Image: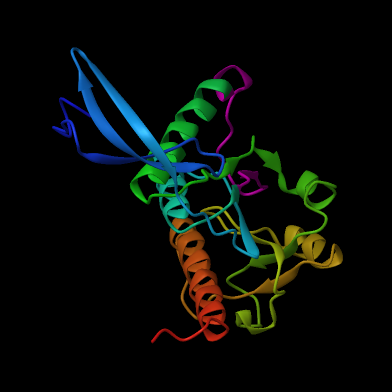
Amino acid sequence: MRHVLRLGTGDSVEVFNGEGQGYLGDVEIQGSQVVVKTLRPLSSEQAPVRIVLAPALIKAAKFEWILQKATELGVHQIVPLATRLSDIRIPEGKLRLRLQRWDRIVIEASKQSRRLVAPRLHEPISFSDLLCSGEFSTCTKMLFYEKASNLWSPDDLPGSGEIMLCIGPEGGWESREVEQAQSSGISVFSLGPWTLRAETAAIAAVSILQHHLFGRSSQHSEPRA
């Protein structure tokens, strides 16, 4: 705060713990120390609909871009998927370091976008294990497939709970995976007539959903004078 942001006594800063608590505090320089005092709680709105993004593993730089942008767009959980046509496999010995790097990216993106809650980042899971996981059994799940006949329109989404968006890898979904998803009750949609890159599809789906959710909430909010 002192050497990079050039803050001094009397300046205000926002601090948060990543778990929903945020505070506005006053900076005070005490010798070589920088102290934040007089903490006042920041208001935190809990979204009635929480987004769970389940993107397939893709090349490292592109996947990290998804993590950053999805965090900025308000995603609540991120579940990396290992799919049949994804050639990205993280060796067990490197998983901890990879998760630590991902966590840093998510935290920095949360700070940049002034989020009080950082998204929960899961360890990678296979798509087949996701389908039978009890942890996500209550999510309303959608899978986006470039060959789907139904164009996605988020008009009939639930008013509360969690919505999971499943995004395929650079090689797309295997037809067998799509069949398994449909058999498990997952709705399969297209995002339009164009073939999108995996990272583009992930952020497009989140953006469309957030736009719809914010629009829906504003329709029910009290008009301001």
Position of the N terminus, as image quadrant, is top left
Q: Position of residue 198 (x, y in %)?
A: 49, 57
Q: Position of residue 36 (x, y in %)?
A: 32, 29
Q: Position of residue 72 (x, y in %)?
A: 42, 54
Q: Is residue 161 above or below residue 113?
A: below
Please state which of residues 183 and 139 is positioned toward the viewer in this rendering. Answer: 139
Farthest residue toward the front? 38
Identity of the residue drawn at 43% across and 62% down: 200
Type of secondary structure dominating the magenta stretch: loop
Q: Is residue 60 visible?
A: no
Position of the C terminus, as image quadrant, is bottom left
Identity of the residue drawn at 49% across and 35% down: 17
Q: Is residue 199 visible?
A: yes
Read off the magenta span.
78-95
Q: Is residue 93 shown in magenta?
A: yes
Q: Is residue 190 shown in magenta?
A: no
User: Could you say which quadrant of the image residue 149 lies in?
Assistant: bottom right
Please state which of residues 63 and 220 is positioned toward the viewer in this rendering. Answer: 220
Q: Is residue 161 left or right of residue 108?
A: right
Identity of the residue drawn at 49% across and 33% down: 103
Identity of the residue drawn at 51% across and 43% down: 118
